Image: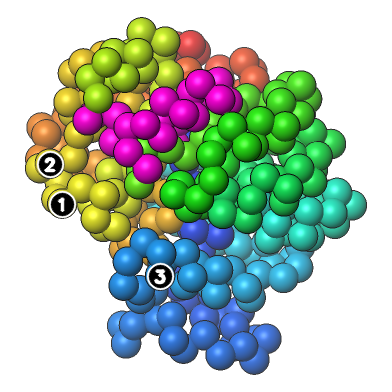
Amino acid sequence: MRDIPKVELHLHLEGGAPPAFIRGLAKEKSVDLSGIFRADGGYTYRDFWHFLQVYEAATSVLTSPDDYARLTTAVLEESAANGVVYSETFLSPDFCGGGDVGAWREYLHAIREAADRAEAQHGITLRGIITCIRHFGPERARPIAECAAQTAGDWITGFGMAGDELKGKPADFKWAFDCAREAGLRITVHAGEWGGAQSVRDALDALQPDRIGHGVQAIDDLALVDRLAEDGIVLEVCPGSNVFLGVCKDWRSHPIEKLRERGVKVTVSTDDPPFFGITMTSDYENLNRHFGWDEEVFAEVNRTALEAAFCDAATKEKIAKRLGTKAP
Ligand SMILES: [Zn+2]
């Protein structure tokens, strides 16, 4: 399972931070983060909302472009060790320069340099999707969309929204998404992780995304499932994350296979893997164990992911070779 070449579309860069890396950085900066670590060194928290707090505490030690370069290196080494050959990561100018375009460019430059080194060393390609944070509100999303529009191109390829799905409505963020779309960016929105099937409908109707982050709660509304299948909306499913955070009570009850059987384009990603004690390899092992997914199914899922990737055709051709398939 580890050696299967994988395409991952839904990974928050800060959410990929290995706990040892964050602990080391906190120590260098004399920041006391002892409250967010378990005795064995992993991250600790009670539920999704506490997770968001721990996440923000952990990311508070990432304060400079150099910190983000080191973070990128640490995250890509871990991804490559799990067979990932192409990754799209969510980047938040909120955390990288506070929404200022000039500061954001410096962070982006450092991240890209680290990504280029990782590609040369480990054969993993990274592209960025800029995300606004839903619970920071629509006004905060505007400068973030401007950062996205100003740096859109062959590396920053998409715009999205993460954060607490129960706060605000997708329609409130229409200005930000229109701004990003006009700059040529592709669109993905977190929905249907906590907000129910209706949150997926709201995101589709208000923001016309190419992909939905999570979307698994669509399973409670079969007309919506059929709409996703017919419109070819790709779901960035993060099953290990869903099981760990309690979106689904266990692996057996996870809807990924039901969605796939009904014709929805599903892909597999890890979201914030070290925060959940998971990797792409462990998710593949669980999908194999609980749903019998074999190499053929994984090959199909990775082809779907490559097709749905926001990178350009030349990059897709390069990645297709690593997957041992034809470019979509
Ligand atoms: Zn996410």
Q: Which residues are magenta?
A: 195-220
- Left or right, 268 with reference to 162: left
Question: Does the beta carbon at disc 2 come under 8 Å from ligand 1?
Answer: no
Which sits in the foreground, 81 or 135? 135
**Rendered-image quadrant of the N terminus:** top left
Question: Quick check: is 201 in the magenta stretch?
Answer: yes
Q: Which amino acid does the dot numbered 2 rest on?
A: Ser
User: Alpha carbon of mark 3 to alpha carbon of mark 2: how far?
Assistant: 24 Å
Q: Which amino acid does the dot numbered 3 rest on?
A: His
- Left or right, 8 with reference to 116: left
Q: Do labels 3 and 1 touch, CB within 8 Å?
A: no
The quadrant where residue 292 appears: top left
- For the point 10% across and 42% down, which residue is it? 252
- For the point 54% across and 46% down, which residue is it? 168
Question: What residue sits right under mark 3 in the picture?
Answer: 50
Question: What residue sits right under mark 1 in the picture?
Answer: 249
Residue 222: image x %, image y %?
Answer: 22, 20
Q: Is residue 117 above or below residue 324?
A: below
Q: Which amino acid does the dot numbered 1 rest on?
A: Lys
